[in-house]
Image: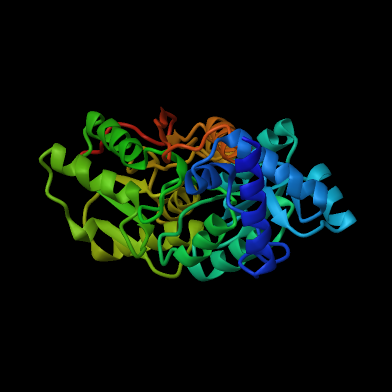
Amino acid sequence: MVHRTQHLVSSLRDAISQGQYVAGQLLPSERELCSREGVSRTTVRRAIQQLVDEGVVYRVPGSGTYVGRPRPQLAEASQQHATIGLILPSLSNPYFGELATAIERECTRAGYQLLIGQSNLSGCSEAPYLARYAENPAVQGVITIASDYAVPVDSYAQLTQIGKPFLFVVRQADMLSADSVATDHVGGARALMHHLFGLGHRRIAYIGQARARAPRHFVGYCEALREAGIAEDPALQVHGQEEQGGDLGQRGVETLLARGVPFTAIFAQIDTVAIGVLRGLRAAGLRVPGDVSVVGFDNIPSAEHLDPPLTTVDHTVSEIGRLAVLFLQDRMLGRYTGPARHVIIQPRLVLRASSGAASVQS
């Protein structure tokens, strides 16, 4: 055992002196060293401890072992201000603000601080935050929402190379292997559609954001139409390119009315779009739900206070926040080192006064 420990100490010391590992660089994890060197975890820990005692490397709790000596202020920050980095599309969307609050609450309970960046669901905006989180020794893990556009795979690879785990919430990036806590957007959308079918609606319009890949809400909308034997009608679909939130909802209503196509219900991709839909219908002199029923997605805090209160889908944000921090902490502390875990939370249909029986034009 002593011979193996000293052999590993010499091997790591030589690698550092030869520049294979440079000052400030993260050493391979204990698990990686065990596998590579064919030794036990006890041997690895003894070897690392000897190098720590010699001042060759230093440990950052929850992050790993780094080459060199820590700066006093850096060591103190790493131990007393352990941080999780969060990247969300925009805090101006009430849903993401609620999600950030839930994650921050769980971070506080676990003893972590939270850094927040806003990416606008753009890989170009996401990459700089990932780089900063990778370079910041206090940041021990990252939570993010996968972009619908170009996912900065290289930036995530940088996190992997230095041993910082990352996790996706709301949706998973298909091209990356990482833990995720996602919402079943397709299932939630199908539930909304079947609710409208049950009220007699067959001419159901969709208003949402155009993206590089079809939003899962729209996928669920289309699946539900097929299940009901209703042909998909492009004239009932409005996919906004530039408009956001309420502007997209109001413009979408104007577009539908200008096309002259009959409809008895509108599925708004998210609640902020639904707010604009309600505004647009009111401006056109149409009653909700007397003339047109409206449904949304997210159950933002203001949804129940709209006029009329909005039928929508609830993500169970508190559970997403709890599981996200728990899973990430498992990785940061080495409590779990297995394959990527994927949890899909089933959303809950919230029925309110904005949806009612179909009008005669259906």
> x, y percentage for residue 181?
47, 38
Please tell me which residue is depicted at 46% across the width and 42% down the height of the picture.
Answer: 180
Q: Residue drawn at (52%, 39%), measured in percent from left and top?
A: 307
Percent of width and height locating residue 232: 16, 52
Q: Residue at x 29, y 65 (%)?
A: 258
The percent coordinates of residue 126 (x first, y second) are: 55, 64
Taking the spot 37% from the left edge, 38% from the top edge, the residue there is 184
Residue extending furthest toward the right: 72
Of the 4 image quadrants, the one containing the C terminus is: top left
Side of 221 relative to 254 (left or right): left
Horizontal arrangement in the rendering, residue 206 relative to residue 156 (left or right): left
* Quadrant in which the N terminus is drawn: top right
Does residue 290 appear in this view?
no
Residue 355 appears in the picture as rendered: yes
Q: Is residue 80 above or below residue 127?
A: above
Q: Where is residue 17 in the image (x, y as percent from the top left)?
A: 69, 66
Front residue of 132/89: it is 132
Tell me: residue 276, above or below residue 125.
above
Please name whichever residue, 328 or 320, is drawn nearer the observer in this view of the structure. 328
Judge from the rendering whether residue 255 lies leftward or rightward of residue 245; answer left or right. Answer: left
